[in-house]
Amino acid sequence: MSRVYNFSAGPAVLPEEVLKEAAAEMLDYKGTGMSVMEMSHRSKAFEEIITTAEQDIRDLMGIPDNYKVLFLQGGASQQFAMIPMNLMKNRVADYIITGQWAKKAAKEAEKYGKVNRIASSEDKTFSYIPDCSDLPVSEDADYVYICENNTIYGTKFKELPNTKGKTLVADVSSCFLSEPVDVTKYGVIYGGVQKNIGPAGVVIVIIREDLITEDVLPGTPTMLTYKTHADAKSLYNTPPAYGIYICGKVFKWIKAQGGLAAMKERNEKKAKVLYDFLDQSKLFKGTVVPKDRSLMNVPFVTGNADLDAKFVKEAKEAGLENLKGHRTVGGMRASIYNAMPYEGVVALVDFMKKFEEENL
Ligand SMILES: *Cc1c(COP(=O)(O)O)cnc(C)c1O
C-alpha cells in the first residue's frame, strides 16, 4: 500500500489514524457484530456515536448551550436555500460576495426575497476580502451572509464583518475546525464536512436557538425546516450515519492533537512554508493579497498555462496529487487542510523548488 499527499479541495485528505480505526471496526463495531453502515440509526450503539460526536464538536468549538448542532444532508449547497427559507422573515438579506460560493448562495436566496449585495471583490477576481467595517447593512435585513473561507480563490475573512447588529450567517465549509472560533458572533455557522472534517454526505449546522422557529416561508418542506431536525436531534429521518461516525472520529483526533488552538498553530506553520516559498519564487506566484490569505487553500500560478499543466502532471508523478486549480481560475491550488501533514507541504515545496530550477 502506498498513500499519496492529496491536496484535493474536497473531498479531501483525512487523518490516517481515523481511516485505520474505521478499517479495524469495519466488520464488527465494538462487539456489535456489525458495521456502523449496517446499524439502525435508532440503536443504542448509534445513539452513543451521535451524542458523543455532538459533545465533542461542542467541546472543540466552545458552542454555548443556546445553540443547536444539526447533522444534515444535502451538502453546503442545500443550505443556500434552507437559510432564506428559515430566516427570511422580512424577505430581505445582505450578501457579501467574495467568490463563487457566496455568489451561488446569493442567487439562490433571490428566489425567496430581496438580496442586497453590499460588498464584493469580483472586480479583482476575488483575490481579496473587501473592507467590511462600515457596510451599508440594510435596515430590514434578516441576516448578513458571508463565505468565511473561499475555497476556490484562497481568501479568508481575518475579521468578521460589522453587521451592525444583524444576524451573521457563515459558510465555513473549507475552514471548519481549522482554528478557534467565537460562536457567539454568529447566528448560523454551517459547512459541508467533506473539506476539513469527514466524508461527503454530511453538513453540520450550528444555529442559535431563537432562529429555529415554525415561522418559515410558506411551502418550506418539512425536511428543509431547521426545527424538524432540532426537535428530533438530527434523527427525524435516517441521518448520514456512517459519515457522522467518521466525523466523530475526526473530532476525537483533533482533541488528541490539542484542540483548535493546536490546529491553528499547525495550520499556520504549514501555510507559512508554502507562502514563504511563493513570496521569493521567481517562477511561482500566489494570487491572493497577503493579508487575506487562507490557511487552507493556497492558489498559485506560473503565468504560463502550459507550464502550469506540466507542473500538475509532474507533481502527480511525484506523489503530490490534485494540485490543479479550480476550473474557473486555472493555475494550481494546494489545499492543506487539518489532516495534511507538515511533511506533505515540505514535500510540495521541495518539488516546486526542483521544478523551478528545471524550468526557469
Ligand atoms: C465545497 C463548498 C461548497 C459546496 O459544497 P457541497 O457540499 O458540494 O454543496 C459550498 N461552500 C464552500 C465554501 C465550499 O468550499
Image (spheres, rainbow, N blue to C red):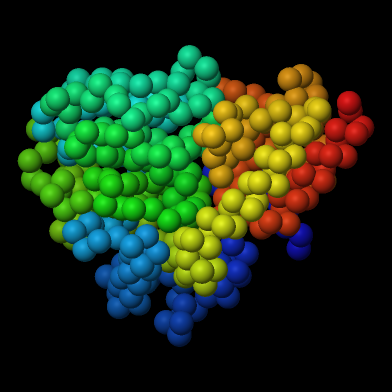
On screen, residue 307 versus residue 174, left or right, reads right
Query: Dividing the image into 4 quarters, which one contains the C terminus?
Result: top right
Toward the viewer: 204 or 149?
149
The location of residue 254, given as percent across then percent down, is: 50, 65
> Does 31 appear above or below 126?
below
Point 50% across, 47% down: residue: 195
The location of residue 317, given as percent across then percent down, is: 82, 43
On screen, residue 188 versus residue 241, left or right, reads left
Q: Residue farthest to the left?
A: 215
The location of residue 31, given as percent across then percent down, is: 45, 85
Q: Residue farthest to the bottom?
A: 31
On screen, residue 29 versus residue 359, left or right, reads left
Point 23% across, 25% down: residue: 137
Query: Dividing the image into 4 quarters, which one contains the N terminus?
Result: bottom right
Q: Residue farthest to the front?
A: 134
The location of residue 294, given as percent across then percent down, is: 54, 40
Point 50% across, 27% down: residue: 128
Q: Quadrant of residue 66?
A: bottom left
> Does 69 appear above or below 257?
above
Q: Count the marks: how many? A: 0
In this view of the protein, can residue 311 be seen by the observer? yes
In this view of the protein, can residue 108 be seen by the observer? no
> Does 88 appear above or below 296?
above
Q: Residue farthest to the top?
A: 123
Point 35% across, 72% down: residue: 52
